[in-house]
Amino acid sequence: MDVKKLMLDIGQKARAASRSIASASSGDKNNALQIVASKLRKSEGLLIRENEKDIQAAKKNGLSSAMIDRLRLTQERIEEMALAVEEIVSLPDPVGEVTRIWNRPSGFRVGRMRVPIGVIGIIYESRPNVTIDAAALCLKSGNACILRGGSEAIHSNTALAALFQEGLAEAGLPAEAAQAVPTIDRTAVRALLTLDEYIDMIIPRGGKPLIRMIMENSTIPVVKHLDGVCHTYVDADADQKMAEEICVNAKLNRPGTCNAMETLLVHADIAEKFLPGLLGRLKNEGVELKGCEVTRKIVPEVGKAKDEDWKTEYLEKILSVKVVGDIDEAMDHIAEYGSAHTDCIVTESHRNADRFLKEVDSSSVMVNASTRLSDGFVYGLGAEIGISTDKLHARGPMGLEELTCQKFIVLGEGHLRE
């Protein structure tokens, strides 16, 4: 297979399809998405069978239990994908929205209108639901997309992309508006990253090595979705019962996701009372605990945390724990070791909550809520194409609006520049 030629053909077809999708009506786009949601439910058996091929290969290749969990499709997760697609249908179409318009002294008007970005390349690992989420968001926002999932999910992603293309075709829209790269050859990614004539933006979702490779090799603008070293800080003024439930949910709801808590910070004034119960509960659930010296004095069975642990995204049942002197030490720790993804404070102090919201520089900052809530679907965006840790163009969960840009429009009546 000539991979470069294959990728060039995919890029050209995506660019051609993007023009049709950009001008498609909201009705046509929504019709396609409704068909996709229906097909997801009707094809549940096929999707689970194809996914099982990936699961068996993952086990054979020694992937961790957390990674296998990210990879697995179940009846419940397929239904969640269908619901996410239907949620996107229910959202307003951002394309063509005039966000602002103003009059100039000579009488002409200037405005700003939302328009699609064009062609978006999405490079991701592990989670097959990204195939549907990304394709659905791109379609509703008027963009064509090229999907390159990880080799570990090739059967799942191929089946899901084929299903999505069927939905496009049945709705009278070009199937090439959502193409999956049909090879696991790694040279396909490098070829994709140089198709700047046809692709307008690259969105990578994966670990640091993947992101680093993409940043070094892409000739196309990249919106980064880096790792999630998410923190929960339990303040001295916290409701400790509520704090315990938040921490358990943030760590155990789905440990293999980027918004799971990886580091727990606890104020010294409550540490002796709060930590034994919480850490005992987490240990009983199979969580490996690593802590600072103060934590280990309070709960001796906790392992010793190394400096590397504070900046590690475990994506499994491992938690780093540190006792801090005050909110300033907690925020300093987050600034030094965090990844600007999602961080939470549990407190009844309005002053400390306000400081945390203003001073913690992350894409999502929370008060008295589990970091697991950091998600486009949960936020009401329908779904997300990823969680951007960048500051330019988009930040946090990226939904429909974040997949558009704005252009100026000028409305005149024969106006000339004097």
Image (spheres, rainbow, N blue to C red):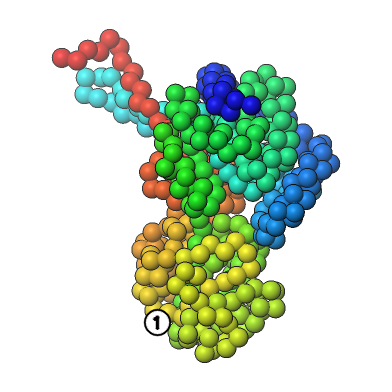
User: Where is residue 108 shown, x and y percent of the image?
Assistant: 28, 19
Where does residue 103 sit, x and y in percent of width and height?
28, 26
Which class describes the residues within 10 Å of circle 1: few (<14), some (14-19), or many (20+)? some
Q: Looking at this view, is 57 or 13 the one in front?
A: 57
Residue at image mark 1: 325
In this rendering, position of residue 209 left or right of residue 173: left
Q: Is residue 279 above or below residue 315?
A: below
Q: Where does residue 290 sit, x and y in percent of width and height?
A: 55, 77
**From the image, which quarter does the C terminus lie in?**
top left
Residue drawn at x 54%, y 89% is 298
State the residue in front, 280 or 301: 301
Q: Residue at x 48, y 37 (%)?
A: 202
Which sits in the foreground, 304 or 260?
304
363 relative to 263, above or below = above
Q: Residue at x 70, y 21 (%)?
A: 169
Q: Residue furthest front?
A: 1
Q: Residue furthest top?
A: 414
Callout 1: helix, strand or loop? loop
Amino acid type at circle 1 is Gly
Q: Quadrant of the N terminus?
A: top right
Q: Is residue 42 above or below residue 240?
A: above
Residue 249 visible, this angle: no
Residue nearest the viewer, comparing 277 with 225: 225
Q: Position of residue 330 (x, y in %)?
A: 41, 73
> Is residue 407 at least partly visible in the picture?
yes
Which image quadrant for residue 59?
bottom right
